[in-house]
Amino acid sequence: MSDAMVTMPEPKELRRHSMLVDTLIRVVKEKPLGTFGGIVVLILFVVGIFSDFIAPYGMNESHLAHRLEPPSSEFLLGTDNLGRDQLSRIIYGARISMVVGLGVSAVAVVFSVGIGLVSGFLGGKVDLITQRFVDAWLCLPPLFIILAVMSLVGPGLLQVIVVLGILFGIGRSRVIRSAVIAIKQNVYVEAARAIGAPTAKILIRHILPNIMAPIIVLFTLDMAAAILTESTLSFLGFGIPPPVPSWGGMISAEGRQFMLLSPWLALWPGLALAIAVYGINMLGDALRDVLDPRLRGGLGRYGRAKGKRTKLSGTTT
Amino acid sequence: MIPTLFIVTVIVFCTARFIPGDVVELMVAQAGQMGSTAEQGATMEAMRHKLGMDVPVHIQYGRWMWGMLVHGDVGKSLWNDRPVLQTIMQRLPVSFELGFLALLVGLVIALPIGVYSAVRQDTMGDYLGRSFAIACIALPSFWLGTMVIVFPSVWWNWTPPMQFIPFTQNPIENLKQFILPAFIMGMVMSGTAMRMMRTMMLEVLRQDYIRTAWAKGLRERTVVYRHALQNALIPVVTVVGLQLPVMISGSLVMEQIFNLPGVGILEIQALNSRDYPVVSGINLLMGTVMLLSILATDLTYGLLDPRIRYE
């Protein structure tokens, strides 16, 4: 299933394929752990999208004769207190995690880019006021405030996505803002303004393409954080309500109640969660190293700077 | 800092106050009061007035701020009439003990492995250390907590003590109770700190003064600990300082799992019973702690690094 990444054609004259493809090729070539992470993410997506076909049983299909059974050939990972097949529920849980991860990241990108662009580009009073709000926001302990907001809007998949998306977005806008401020200094922005380009056009044509690198990195890292936070929320009972097989909720509801009778109920969902988050983080780390070394916060290795300086010129017109 | 704190109070107040589900309705329902709807309406009206909830939200906010600034009073619990500050102060030592122990565990794990990883870069030990760090970041703490309770009890018939024992009563039993959650929280935190420690050490080890130190013929121990570590630690302090929110959030989950009566459990109870003053009190307190810790981190930075001076 790594075909999608490996079999990209690479003749010299086709060098202008999109930045995303370019990046993926570099990840596969240079970062074995990142590639592994990419494969995990791919598996998560495939399982999430095709869970209806992969899962042996329905997600809420109960076999009352087979309650709390240990793993067997019929139920590979055992069954829970209602006789539901654990493997199927974990497979459907992958879908929930995928939707949460992608959804939260997408909402977060919209918010962080929106706030970051406006605040960083306009500067002055707008920046000052916006940043005080962001400051205040970052001061609040994340889980506490998320819990308060979640009980404000009530539990549910959509609520989790919107709330986490906005919350993550506000925090991440800092990174986007500083990227925007750095790009703003460039001569071509000044030139665009000199020929009378409207602000909106400068933002979209000149600034936005140049901050794609941090956006992609933040998207990936947010995905891991979102999946982890959602499962924590569901575990505490503030996330996605029970009949839906969220990995966090499974650990809490069936797992903790019946943990002495059948310890595997809490084991599998957590394992799935850990592998998914680990994979996404590895991919995110690799993407960060390849795309935006500034975000790394220090010198990585010496002597691995392969000639790749013309990155910025490829994306602007 | 003052405007920031002001905005924090607004956010905290609003999120708590707009939680749907009226506390008064909940109370009336709980009291199981009989009577006509009109009578019930009257009782609810009276209760609202008593709780000061019959005025617009901005006036409620004004009263709340006034009470805090002038009397140092964060409000009273809507359910049992006890001052919020007092309730929180009772719970706070538990959360702080947990957070402090976790920080200690985290640093004890993170610093040596981080330094070792950097000094022996690209060896087997380095790979093991780094994999461990990433595993620490990826493992959900609530799952680890659950596993720690489940498997020992299934295999060896042993469960961690669930009845809370205050430190003043029996320090040893109390520490026994805290060590597991603290260890899990510390592990989760150590991942980030370890990676930071490694990166910083690598950077410092390539500086000219380190080469000078080697050239002088100093022992490895002296070079690493006296010359490199002291300089590499500075940014790590920042990271550790900024880990405080992770600690606080982690303590909420751990308190829930290990049944420790800290601030986190109080928050969840208050949220479920719509006890707004308690919720806002806790969030405000946590926000202030965060703000102070950010400030403290900045100041320590200045103390540790002679190149940075605050006017």
Image (cartoon, coloured by chain):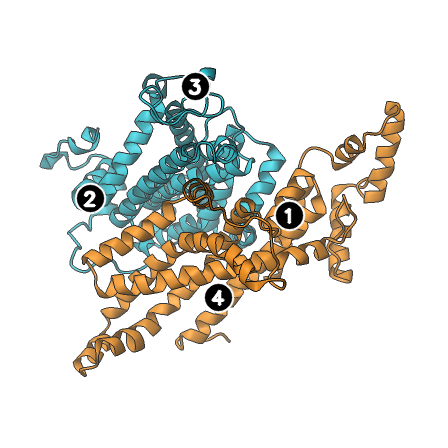
Which one is in front in this view, the residue at disc 3 or the one at disc 4? 3
Q: Helix, strand, or loop for circle 1?
A: helix
Q: Which residue is mark 3?
A: A66
Other-residue count near label 4 (Cα within 10 Å), few / some / many at <14 / 14–19 / ≥20: some
Instruction: Give how far across and how far down residue A184 sits, in percent.
Output: 38, 51
Which circle's residue, 3 or 2, is located before the other in the chain?
Answer: 2
Q: Helix, strand, or loop for circle 3?
A: helix
Image marks 1 and 4: residues in contact by CB distance under 8 Å: no
Numbered tag placed on residue A32 in the rendering? 2
Instruction: Give the residue type at disc 1.
Output: Leu
Image quadrant occupied by the N terminus of chain B: bottom right
Image marks 2 and 4: residues in contact by CB distance under 8 Å: no
Subunit that carries the residue with mark 2:
A
Q: Which residue is mark 1?
A: B266
Comparing B304 with B80, the one in front is B80
- Looking at this view, name the residue that lies furthest to the bottom: B216
Image marks 3 and 1: residues in contact by CB distance under 8 Å: no
